[in-house]
Image (cartoon, rainbow, N blue to C red):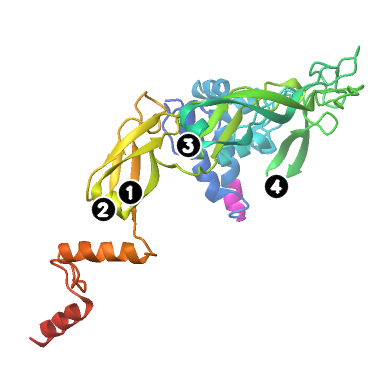
Amino acid sequence: MHEATHSMSQDYYELLGVDRDASPEEIKRAYRRLARTLHPDVNPDPETQERFKEITRAYEVLSDPKKREIYDLGGDPLSASGRGGASTGFGSGFSFTDIMDAFFGTTTTRGPRPRKRRGQDALLRLSVELAEAVFGAVKEIQVDTAVVCSTCSGAGTAPGTTPVTCTVCDGRGEVSSVQRSFLGQVMTTRPCPRCQGYGTVIPSPCPECAGEGRVLSRRTLAVRIPAGVDDGTRIQLAGQGEVGPGGGPAGDLYVEIEVEPHEVWTRRGHDLHCSVTLPMTAAALGTTITLETLDNDILELDVKPGTQSGHQIRVPGHGVPHLSSPQRGDLIVHVIVETPTKLDHAQRELLLQLARLRGEDKLTGQLASGRKGVFSRIRDAFNDRSA
């Protein structure tokens, strides 16, 4: 509808291959797609360079809502702004930053950057006993991190002074320069070298923090360890990390738990395991064992007559609490039956008498029922292949 009234020889929408009702994101995607193949660094052919200039002019107009409106109404937004259209390439108002934003999909924040920024997170490893990890505890830790400078309260300036506006960038935090190239005039923007992009300079830095607004300090913190933490669990302490530059908000402190080995108990998931060694006679006759748990309870456990080595006795509800519920795991006691290695004459005679009574004095050992010896398995395999 507007094509006949346009002073330009080519339709910008047609150049980018988009509809007239295309969204800004669709226009940007179309330009990026074409620029990847038409950019002079990729294709130095003169005809291709001219094509790249055309799609760049089209993107300059269609990516700007005001220029696009003028174009849709039949006007020439480049001429209207006094930039002379094609003769100046991108024009003095279309910076190199704008091109890179469309070409690479980057987003650039304009203006001075703030001096006050959030601090980094910190990680500290804390060694705890098994009982502390299982039932919870409160531990004191010492942390060396940055804190707000008490002399300047984070401002970074000496007492009685304030930052002043940078005279190089006039407080913008960036400086621009225009260079001529085969594309026309290209404007580049970079952080101000004098103020490092802040827009202000500190003529008299704080003598305590040298203008940083923060100093290194040692603090003592109380850490609450929840019941049920395990080796490698991380506890987050919000706002207890290091203070940011310029007295900015502190990051978080993460405390990673390292559980020390216990001489009796071993944790597996939410269960606690231990081993109890019994004499052969106690295992055969049955007995009662007294066990002190990790939380100092005294349990009496019955060992049934004939208990074998490797038998497990499970005590429900005396293990590790779950972090998300009051439920606890179990205690698991592993029974180890000890065979005597040294017998005096009287003990040997008693065992021989027992063996005779049980008809076991002539036994030489047998394979368990349903299982075959090594040579039997080899013979069976050979017979199967020969059949």
Residue 18 badge: none
**First in residue order: circle 4 vs circle 3:** 4
Name the residue rendered at 66%, 23% in the picture.
Answer: 221
Q: In which quarter of the image is residue 160?
A: top right
Q: Residue furthest bottom?
A: 386
Q: Which residue lies furthest to the left in this view?
A: 387
User: Could you give the CA–CA distance between mark 3 and mark 1, rounded to whole angstroms?
Assistant: 26 Å
Closer to the observer: label 2 or label 4? 2
Closer to the observer: label 2 or label 3? 2
Name the residue rendered at 73%, 45% in the picture.
Answer: 181
Closer to the observer: label 1 or label 4? 1
Mark 2 residue type? Gln
Mark 1 residue type? Val
Residue position for label 1: 335
**First in residue order: circle 2 vs circle 4:** 4
Residue position for label 3: 230
The kind of secondary structure the magenta stretch mainly shows is helix
Q: Could you tell me if the residues under marks 2 and 3 are in contact, i.e. CB atoms within 8 Å? A: no
Residue position for label 4: 182
Regarding mark 1 in the picture, which secondary structure is present there?
strand
| Residue stretch in magenta | 44-50
Residue position for label 2: 308
In the picture provided, is 11 more to the left or to the right than 276? right
